[in-house]
Image (cartoon, grey):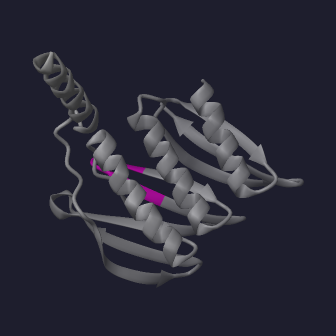
Amino acid sequence: MFRTIQAALIAVALTLVALVVPAGPAVAASCSTASTQALVGGHRVKIYCGVAGYFDGFGTTLTEANLEALRLYQLYLTYGERCSGSTVGSVVGGRSVSIYCPGRYTDSFGSNLTDAAVEARELVTMRLAGGPNCDGSSVATLVGGYRVTLFCAGRYVRGQGSTLTEAAQIARLTAALG
């Protein structure tokens, strides 16, 4: 009876260990802020994450820029592609952000720097997850709002919204839905 209980306890312990041990070989590096830079409309934060290297994030606040850099590192951990914020610009109604992934740039728009960075990252995420490959093409004003045009693998997709961020979100959702 003692051996039966002992065997059952060992089986339970091994099951618990199997539930806690990660299945994949990926190991996250600790990241730390390498530098910060004030920009028109916000900030750029460069983080260093060991062998993964540097990741630049943009945001309206220093906190948001840091979070965007960490989210780009998270994309690297999830998909294995090292993408980093590249450039920022001004467009009618807000800001533009370009993210560089090996061999390609992805641009998007938002009412502020954080929203533009989030939209660019979401377009990259959509592509890496097997969705359409889209890039911000243009911004236009409309009566009551904005229109964002994305170029997605040979076709144009448009979204309209009261704010530039909403127009960009609607264009991205329209592209994702096909």
Vertical order, 35 against 31 (above or below): below
Q: Closest to the observer: 14 or 124?
A: 14
Left or right of residue 30, residue 99 in this image: right
For the stretch drawn in magenta, the main secondary structure is: strand
The reply to whether the magenta stretch includes residue 160 is no
**Quarter that holds the N terminus:** top left
**Quarter that holds the C terminus:** top right
Boundaries of the magenta span:
98-105
Q: Closest to the observer: 168 or 36?
A: 36
Q: Position of residue 158 (x, y in %)?
A: 68, 39
Q: Residue at x 62, y 51 (%)?
A: 138
Q: Residue at x 15, y 59 (%)?
A: 51
Vertical order, 59 against 77 (above or below): below
Q: Position of residue 100 (x, y in %)?
A: 36, 55
How many marks can you see?
0
Left or right of residue 88, residue 129 in this image: left
Left or right of residue 6, residue 121 in this image: right
Q: Position of residue 55 (x, y in %)?
A: 32, 63
Left or right of residue 33, residue 136 in this image: right
Q: Position of residue 15 (x, y in %)?
A: 24, 27
Q: Closest to the observer: 107 or 115?
A: 115
Vertical order, 72 against 1 (above or below): below
Residue that protrudes farthest toward the front in the picture: 1
Q: Residue at x 57, y 59 (%)?
A: 116
The reply to whether the magenta stretch includes residue 101 is yes
Residue that protrudes farthest toward the bottom in the picture: 38
Q: Residue at x 56, y 62 (%)?
A: 96
Vertical order, 66 against 153 (above or below): below
Residue that protrudes farthest toward the left in the picture: 3
